[in-house]
Image (cartoon, grey):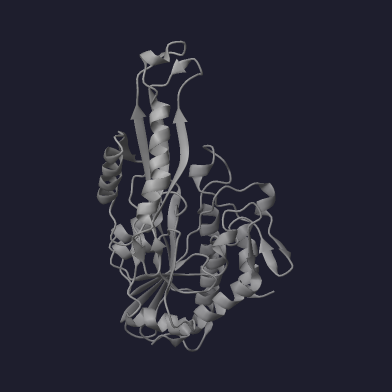
Amino acid sequence: MEAATKLLRELVALPSVNPAFLPAGDARAGEQHVAEFLSHEARHAGLDFIGFQDVLPDRANFLTSLSPTGKVERRILLAPHLDTVSAEGKQLQPVIKNGRLHGRGACDTKGSVAAYFTALCAVAKSKQRPRHTEIIFAGLVDEENGQSGSRALARSGFKADLAIVGEPTRCRVVTAHKGDLWLRLTTHGKAAHGARPELGRNAIHAMARVVDVLETDYAAQLRCRRHPLLGHGTVNVGAIRGGVQANIVPDRCEISIDRRTLPGETEAGIRREIQALLRKHKLAATIANTKSGSCPALETDPRQPLVREFLDAAGQSRPLGVDFFCDAAILARGDIPSVVFGPGDIAQAHTANEWIALTQLERATALLTRFLLSLP
């Protein structure tokens, strides 16, 4: 069995579900089992530095590196994340069938972890070890919820000349991705007995009009602004909560919306345009952010030398953009030029029958190994 495939089977069998998606104390929660396993493998491979960066209680970024044979002149960061979304029993049992490896995290993003780590170990064993480039592997925690791992690494002052962030991109180099803003809109009414609804103000009815405006007028407004790689921003009303029971006029209603953003858009600007649209339709709602940290869009200049080198190594003449959000934008805000790359297809991520094509896994490993070995 190829090294990356063997490693991926072992990783999928180790639960690393983000604790945000599980009850407190659940044995499947947290990335520590994967981090400890990789630490053992790094020692066996003879990598030069092995350590942990505390991020959250009992959750730490795993760091290991390969030093150059000479003076360090530049630094490459390999940064996949270790956490997954929720997993049931069978999803933690890796199964290979018809050229695919099935299991939770196989695609998002333990496939990238396996490819990156295997490539780093191959370079460590090679006689072509870079003379002036340090290569650092950072297994990040909490990408699936609050991006606490990448935020902690960026805040620490860590610097690199290029970060390659692991996500399923079908082995294509991505230089731009959308941002993500979660907002809660609340309408307020006046409670009354259901037998006399004219004595109250129905907050759900008011919210129904708000939802209609967001899903029609606002969505159309967003389609008028386009990015060359990312297309247009989007809005989705994903949840609604309001009322107590049928015979009470509801005095409060909330919705949660997902707003995918383009480079240059800000939370303040988005709030202003939503409020302006509601005023235009004589509607009123309060707006609040439901995430503690912003999730910006990514836009990395593909003309940067290392980015261009990586594009060339991938046989790619043009950069690409993707709709999903990941750690790359957080690292880029920390002044680390970042791209996204990894085996697998985002269409398989988070699905009940998550899988990755083993040809993708081996291709990503080989491509990344060649790129790292080509570095000076």
Say whether residue 70 is left or right of residue 172: left
Q: Residue at x 26, y 43 (%)?
A: 276
Q: Is residue 40 visible?
A: yes
* Image-based side of 236 in relation to 337, left or right: right
Q: Can I make out residue 54 in this image?
A: no
Query: Residue 211 appears at what percent x and percent y?
Result: 42, 39
Task: Tell how many labels.
Answer: 0
Q: Where residue 9 sits: x, y (%)?
A: 65, 63
**Above or below for 214 versus 251:** below
**Residue 118: x %, y % from top left:** 55, 73
Nearest the camera: 149 or 206? 206
Query: In which quarter of the view is residue 317 placed?
Result: bottom left
Q: Nearer the viewer, residue 161 or 267?
A: 267
Q: Report which quarter residue 214 is drawn in.
A: top left
Please determine whether, in this image, residue 309 is positioned above or below residue 356: below
Residue 327 falls left or right of residue 37: left
Q: Position of residue 117 (x, y in %)?
A: 52, 70
Q: Work out which quarter of the rendered image holds the N terminus and state it.
A: bottom right
- Residue closest to the eye, 13 or 367: 367
Query: Which residue appears at 38% of the width and 16% of the height?
Result: 191
Quadrant of the rendered image containing residue 324: bottom left
Give the residue furthest to the right. Answer: 98
- Residue drawn at x 27%, y 63% is 157
- Which quadrant would the C terminus be assigned to in this image? bottom left
